[in-house]
Image (cartoon, rainbow, N blue to C red):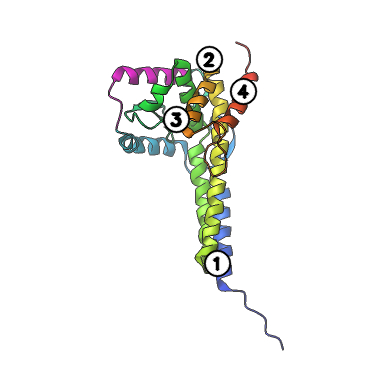
Amino acid sequence: MRQKRKFPIRLLIMGGFILFSVISYYMKSQVNPVTGEKQRVSLSPEEEVAMGLQSAPQMAAQFGGLYADNNVQLKIRSIGQRLVNSSHASKSPYQFNFHVLADERTINAFALPGGQIFITAAMLSKLKTEDAVASVLGHEIAHVIHRHSAEQMAQKGLLNGIIQGVAMGSGTMNGGQIASYVGQMVNMKYGRDDELESDEFGVKYCHQAGYDPRAALDVMKVLAEASGGADRSDFNSTHPSPANRIEKINEHLAALPAR
């Protein structure tokens, strides 16, 4: 009588690990308090605020601390608050604060969960108008409102669980390395989608606040110069190329209502 083959125990472990990760991810479902969008996130808005406030000093330290000119700080806060007050961000549970970082070499702006928004002195020096500054800050406000960081955390938790399951099930590192590479590519795609969504709402926020939303195109020129060219490929990058972003921004500008 032919003996039945036993199912390898490591494959059972792999399947169980992956199934648990997927179920855990899909149970992390919340409705965005501002947009009404159903999202997969593991943090509450209050936890996002607390995380951002706790991380802000350490993040600032990595960029040389805060810029010393208090007048510049006040100006950026004024622009940022005007954007918040004139958009649905004003109805959010987030605590928006705007900071200029002392770093005069790194062209960057970013948002922490919960509303802590930073722009480097290097980035600020490249922006020639208040409208361009508003465009950058509006983009970062959109990241906060759409909970992109919280979504990324939940997605990375899912992918890490799948990667660990594949590594255990394959019995070698090769399987885990392949899964890890695929996971990185998926995360990069999410990152590009987030950037395009923030571009769209950044344009809307500027328009609502009375700034010229066309300044977003000037910001793209700055980013293109900093990244080595407007036609850089999207592949293997967390951000869309400036050329692709310009195309989408022009579509959003055309769709804006007349003032």
Does the magenta segment cover residue 69? yes
Q: Amino acid at mark 2?
A: Asp
Locate residue 203, reporting x and y percent: 55, 22
Q: Which residue is labeled 1 in the image?
A: 169
Place of residue 34 in the rendered image (x, y in percent of width and height, measured from the top left) = 54, 29
Where 131 falls versus 248 (above or below)?
above
Task: Please tell me whether mark 3 sits on a helix, a strand or a loop.
Answer: loop
Using the image as rendered, state which of residue 237 and residue 196 is in the foreground: 237
**Boundaries of the magenta span:** 65-83
Q: Secondary structure at mark 2?
A: loop
* Residue at point 42%, 23% (across, down): 126
Report which quarter residue 207 is drawn in: top right
At label 4, counting other C-alpha atoms closer than 10 Å, the crowd grade (few under 14, some 14-19, many 20 or more) is: some
Mark on residue 94? 3
The residue type indicated by label 1 comes to Gly
Q: Which residue is mark 4?
A: 250
Image height of 128 relative to 119, above or below: above
Residue projecting furthest to the right: 1
Q: Which residue is mark 2?
A: 212
Among numbered discs 1 and 3, the one appearing first in the sequence: 3
Q: Is residue 27 visible?
A: no
- The answer to whether the residues at label 1 and label 4 have Cβ atoms under 8 Å apart is no
N-term mark: 1 or 4: 1
Q: Earlier in the sequence, mark 3 or mark 2?
A: 3
Q: Looking at the picture, which amino acid does disc 4 mark?
A: Asn
12 horizontally vs 80: left or right: right
Q: For the residue labelled by badge 4, is the local secondary structure a helix, a strand or a loop?
A: helix
